[in-house]
Structure formats: structure tokens, C-alpha cells
Image (spheres, helix red, strand yellow):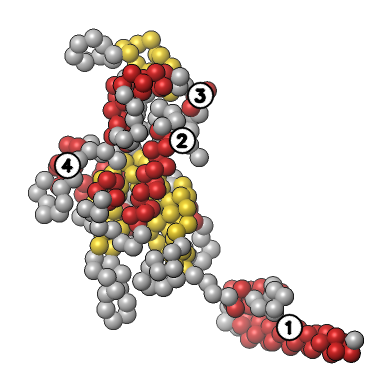
Amino acid sequence: MPRNQDEQHSNLSAGSSLEAEGKRAIRDARAAGGSTAQRLRSQELWRDESGRSLEDYPRPSVAVDVAVLTVPDPLDLELRYSSSSQETESEGGLHVLLVLSEIRSSNQPLSKPSWSLPGTFLHDGETLIQATNRALLTKAGIKGLHPRQLKVFDELRRDPRGRVLSVGHFELVNWEKIRQAVLFNPDIRLRSVRSVAEKRTRVRIDHREIVSQAAERVQADYRSVPDPYRLLAEPFTLRDLESLHRRIDPDGTPAKDTFRRRMMNYLVDTESTSSGSIGKPARLFENNPSRTGRNRPT
């Protein structure tokens, strides 16, 4: 019993000492600025059972990396890369936006210039979505997108600079939204998802995995409904819809008849036909909001 009382007295003394130390630190910090004092006040109040505050625990850096996917116009790609010594992207399908990246230490580069997803570190007082928007604007000159969280990538050695967690994000956008940035910014490249997956396009650290998982999410969405990301302007023909699916998910799109039967459950016939086409005019369709929803998948 006395031993327990001694231990209790010792714990109380230690707690009083910590409290006094915290109060002295706050008084000293107030002259330096309110934010420092506020942070120290938080440390004083919030300690766990071992007496440690948040400042006593390891804090990995948090970054965001954004996979911006699109289905580009092949003619634009020919225009962009025909005279370039870089890899020519003549293949169709789903593409990802990459930016020129170079990591440097104080005295020498840690890596050679390479291609990576637009990304940045999370700033104090900033949300993840604010960080993704800042990364897209500063690294690629793009704004107005709404990336969604994919997953956290936390391999221990994923970044040569130290312990960094990356919250991967993705977005599938209409080509016209990023066309100007891709065509006229020399520090931006558009590469097919397939070339990244097959390592024909080299990207930094684990960005290949982020791209692959983002593409898988998008492809899964298109196996469920006709055009969940609204890439096609309405109304559209079944031929246009099938062509889009085959570019996004060539391996997962079924044969023509099966595809059309499956999609008809989610479409509304506008009872009008296309004009200016050769041969028999094609019927025009719209997405059925009651079956597909009015917005993109969440």
C-alpha cells in the first residue's frame, strides 16, 4: 500500500512538473507569436497516459499525388509529339498526365529529372483537396477539377527524402479541360496508362501503382453504367458510346451485341437521329438519370 502511495505521489509530482514546464514555455513563447503559444498550450493539455504529447511521436510527412486521366484526341497527340525526340504516343486509349520532376538535396540531386504525377506536400492549415488543387495549378497550370481520394500509399521506402505518406487521388476528365495545358506546356507529357503499366514510360517512385489503381477504378465504373464521368456530350449514338468504352477499358468491354443490350437498361431513346453521317442515320440516346444518377460515381 505505501508503495502504491509513493508511486501515486511520484506521478502527481511528475504531472505538476510537466504542467509547470508547459506554462513557462507558453509564457516565453507568447512574445514570439500567438501560434507558437497556442501549439504549446495544446501540448500541455493533451498528453497520453505516458505523459507524451503529439510532438513526442514521429510525424511522417504527408503528400498528395493526383492521377489525371483522360481520353485524348489522337490528332492532337500527333500534333504534340510528332517532332519530339520524346516517346511518341500514337496509341489510343486511357492516358495520364505527367509532369517533369526533380528531387534535390542541399548539395546534389537525389534523382535525375523524371516524370511523375502532379503532387505536393500538405501545408499546415490545408485540407487534402486544397493541396491537390494547389498541386494541379502550380505543377500543371490546371484548375477547376475535383479529384477524389484513391488510397494511402505508405511503403516505408517509397520516397528517398524520408518517411512520406502519399494520399493518392484521381480524376477522369474530358480532354478539352486539359488540352491547352498538355499541348503547350513543355514540362507536361501525356502518356498512355498501358505504357506506364508496362514500364515503357518511367515514372518516379510508386506513381506507377497509383496510375494503375486509378485506371482500375475508372474501368470498374464504366463496366457498371454507360458514361459515369460524362465524357460524351448528350445526346450520343451507341457507336460513340461503345468506342469510348473500348478506349477506356479494351479488355473489359464485351462484344458489340452484348454491350448494347447491357447499356440499353441505362439509356433513354431521344427518338431523334444523328445528322451528317454516311448511311442510315443512327438513333441518339441520353443517360437515364433515374438509373445512372446525375453526377459521377462517388
Residue 143: give x, y in percent of width and height: 38, 48
Q: Quadrant of the N terminus?
A: bottom right
Q: In what element is the residue under mark 3?
A: helix
The residue identified by callout 2 is 296
Is residue 110 at all visible to an observer of this figure?
A: yes
First in sequence, mark 4 or 3: give its number.
Answer: 4
Residue placed most toward the observer, 91 or 124: 91
Q: Label 3 to label 2, Cα distance in Å?
A: 12 Å
Residue placed most toward the observer, 135 or 110: 110
Q: Residue at x 29, y 53 (%)?
A: 98
Characterize the local packing of mark 1: few (<14), some (14-19) or many (20 or more) Cα atoms within 10 angstroms: some
Q: Residue furthest right?
A: 1
Q: Amino acid at mark 1?
A: Glu
First in sequence, mark 3 or 2: give its number.
Answer: 3
Characterize the local packing of mark 2: few (<14), some (14-19) or many (20 or more) Cα atoms within 10 angstroms: few
Characterize the local packing of mark 4: few (<14), some (14-19) or many (20 or more) Cα atoms within 10 angstroms: some
Q: Amino acid at mark 2?
A: Arg
Residue placed most toward the observer, 29 or 256: 256
Residue contact between numbered discs 4 and 3, judged by CB atoms under 8 Å:
no
Q: Residue at x 39, y 66 (%)?
A: 158
The residue identified by callout 4 is 90
Q: In what element is the residue under mark 1?
A: helix
First in sequence, mark 1 or 3: give its number.
Answer: 1
Q: Label 1 to label 4, Cα distance in Å?
A: 67 Å
Q: Which mark is residue 19?
A: 1
Q: Amino acid at mark 4?
A: Ser
The residue identified by callout 3 is 291
Q: Name the mark nearer the viewer: 1 or 4.
A: 4
